[in-house]
Amino acid sequence: MTAVDEAIRPVTARDAEPTAPTVVGHASPPGAPWTLLFLVGVGMVLVGMLGLRDASLAVVIFLTVLFLVFLARHVAFAVSALASAPRDMRTRSGFDFGYYPFVSILVPCRNEELVIEGLVTTLLALDYPDDRHEIIIIDDGSDDGTGDIVDALVRRHPVLNCIHRPAGAGGGKSGALNTALQTLRGEVVVVFDADHKPRADVIRRLVRHFADPSVGAVQGRCIVRNSNETRLARSIAVDYYCGYLVNEYGRQSLFELPAYGGSNCAARTGWLRAFGGWNERTVTEDTDLTLRLILVGRYVRFDLTAIDTEESVPTFRRFWRQRYRWARGHQQAWREYRQSIWGAPGLTRAQKVESTMFLLVYHVPVFCMLGLAMVTLRAAGVLTWGNGLDLTPIATLLFLGPLLELASGLLVSRAPRKAAAGILLFLPAFVLFTVVCTKSWFDGVIGRPYTWVKTPRTGHGQQPTVGVPA
């Protein structure tokens, strides 16, 4: 049995939908300054008890263990994907169960005049029964030509519906989605960001998993289509092989814990409404929904055969803005959910450990920055912890983990050789990512306000250019 078959396992009595689900709250504290004070206090106590040299050694040992644990995680995901993902990418077993729930396809958009028509064109060509789906575009207060373009499309294609939110309605992407959630008719909600273009069979591949009532959400695989636009876009295209193939595949095959990713994804409407909709007080509604589902015993599934393409950020400035938003939301999720994870009765110990590591992904770069600061202070003669342990080779091992995942993604996806050139920007991009995450962490713990910010589009790249498997 392949991993895809296992993900679509037969329904059993224990999978029945609860009649009165326990809804996880999503309070969002404005910040956690006590975290910074606590860490400073711990540092002062360590220095007072052990002295500066031994306290520094203790921190170095902690960082070494942390980096080695995450290296092992990267290796495990890469091995899992290399062993099984190529077969699962080609399998068609169990593809059509004759299960066609009514689907509401949602497209939240703000100032997307460069890409919205391209997405709508692909949505109109979806291979799913016309009487079993609706398409709802939510124009979230656009001040460019998006609203006019969408209105013209609606007049030409009655299957389309459009909701216009006034400017300043609030809630970001989550607010736009929640507006549609109030009136949509689907048993399953499928979400696409405006720059995405799904393959015709994506809906059928996503919704087949909901034949199992234990499934709360499903994530498809995203591929960058504008990788020839800039060197950074090519590097991010390779990174997507890691994130949307090796990483998600490993989390599913080893722990049954893939993440809902926010686009090219589906969620059960009943659970969304039970949760009160998407969390409008976070800027990463996808991570938040993932955690709320697993805390109430619902599965998130990853379908690596449900493929769509999207536009990558082409510049480092946009890379910074996008990754900063991801870091703020993910780090907020750590503050809100880390205790709930360990109290969740439906998670095994291994799943709790993996969920904790998942929540720490955007903290590891902060620890990298701490290690870099300590190495710099040691070189300047301010700190010393002896000669028996050096952070430099340990940090090198931390880089090797993601590089192994990237290389595995290229192999599994059968990408052309020229795609490997995208790895060359990995190091500078990772250094920038480390700075982004560190700034995000400090901004978060001191409670600096931040609201959802959309990623600007260029409209470039109409076809995938880096190794899209059949």
Image (cartoon, rainbow, N blue to C red):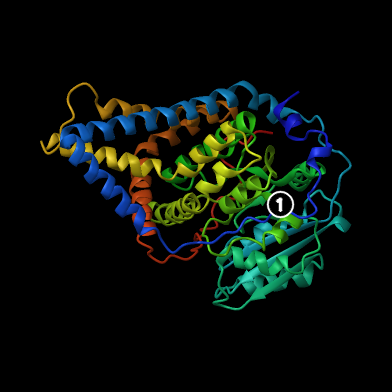
Q: Quadrant of residue 222?
A: top right
Residue at left offset 76%, top offset 48%: 203
Q: Quadrant of residue 189?
A: bottom right
| Amino acid type indicated by mark 1 | Ala
Residue at left offset 51%, top offset 59%: 283
Of 373 and 457, the residue lying toward us: 373
Q: Name the side, left or right, on which 238 lies relative to 387.
A: right
Residue at left offset 58%, top offset 39%: 244
Q: Name the side, left or right, on which 296 lies relative to 61.
A: right
**325 relative to 414, above or below:** below
Q: Is residue 295 visible?
A: yes
Of 431 and 170, the residue lying toward us: 170
The residue pinned by badge 1 equals 267
Residue 291 pos. (x, y %) = 59, 48
Residue 47 pos. (x, y %) = 19, 40
Q: Name the side, left or right, on which 167 lies relative to 55.
A: right
Q: Name the side, left or right, on which 77 lies relative to 201.
A: left
Q: Quadrant of residue 350?
A: top right
Screen quadrant of the C terminus: top right
